[in-house]
Image (tube, rainbow, N blue to C red):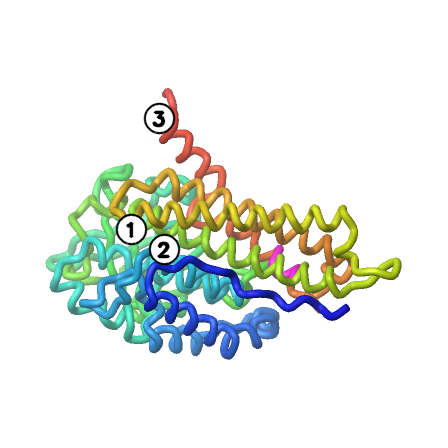
Amino acid sequence: MPDRAPQPVERQLPTEESRDLLALVREIVQGEIQPRAAEEEDAGHFPREVFTLLSDSGLLGLPYDSEFGGGDQPYEVYLQVLEELAAARLTVGLGVSVHSLACHALAGYGTKEQQAEHLPAMLGGGLLGAYCLSEPASGSDAASLRTKAVRDGGDWVITGTKAWITHGGIADFYTVLARTGGDGARGITAFLVPGDAENLSAAAPEKKMGMKGSPTAQLHFDGVRVPDARRIGEEGQGFAIALSALDSGRLGIAACAIGVAQAALDEALSYATGRLQFGRPIADFQGLRFMLADMATRIEAGRALYLAAARLRDAGRPFSRQAAMAKLFCTDAAMSVTTDAVQVLGGYGYTMDFPVERFMREAKVLQIVEGTNQIQRMVIARHLAGPESR
């Protein structure tokens, strides 16, 4: 029996424009991303040329205002684009999500003058961004960050170290959260820092178990000077800006997780319908059929959950709880589905001859980034039962 060719996901899209957009994304995926994904990930190659193509195609600024070069697309559409990109290669899908996260502060809280000066290049001018919140001693407890920004005339001088920065060392701009006041969340301010700023340097990229093509590195700010015109929002508003960005970023991670899970299911189905044992395809055996059914159900449930949260966001309604739920459920689903995909392929699944082992390694990081899944549970519980007693 021939292998079962994976079928494109049937999507409910709101407009003809969005359907054309998805068709363009699939064309780029099939022609430029998927054919080289395994080889380039194994070699640790970052596909900057792909991000340039996505920028030239109008795909790096989809959820932002067209006045400044964005695509005017609702999150309902943008997230499905992310899913398609992540299914082809997580380095690309997650990279687009991180870039969008890095643009969020300026797009949402910058002045009109700041937006007009910087956003066109960020959204459609070929630039690539990164988001700098975490530090070596400040991960889940982000409000305890220590990187400082001190006023010096009309400038700010930033000193400290940021950690776990996707695109660290290769980004053209960084959205940086730094302490300008006292302890806690109220003392944090956001800044837009050029990637080539003097006294800004990157450590060697982390050696990761997955996503080897996506550089993750510490950034060292050794007295980086930026003008006050690059301060985003008011002094002390930075942590609120960061939380606002993370709500949207969590939906991006949820969509990427479902993309990875869908790719793993497609590979498992192709193998199971073509692999013969005891004279018939292994997909005929009930134990394996039930496993495939559970995998598909988790994917459909996750997709419905992140789209429901996206539609709340698009309607201007609160969506923080739903974003945390989507990030939690979708990334746990991706870990489960990719692990099961390895099992479906048996010994072959444990080799690099098939992509499911890569999908499993990539799924793990999605349970950690943009707030660990333990943090997501805390966020959800606070929405349900209120803050914890002290």
The answer to whether the residue labelled 1 contacts the one labelled 2, judged by CB atoms less than 8 Å apart, is yes
At 68% from the left and 66% from the top, the residue drawn is 4
- Judge whether residue 323 is colored magenta: no
Marks 1 and 2 sit apart, C-alpha to C-alpha, by: 7 Å
Residue 205 visible at all: no
Residue 43 visible at all: yes
> Quadrant of the image for the C terminus?
top left
Q: Which stretch did the figure color magenta?
A: 356-360
At 20% from the left and 55% from the top, the residue drawn is 232
Residue tagged 1: 314
Where residue 76 is drawn, which disc sits there?
Answer: 2
Position of residue 137 measured from the top left corner of the image (x, y, whole percent): 42, 44
Which of these two is toward me, 296 or 163? 296
At 31% from the left and 50% from the top, the residue drawn is 245
- Tell me the kind of residue under disc 2: Glu
Marks 3 and 2 sit apart, C-alpha to C-alpha, by: 30 Å
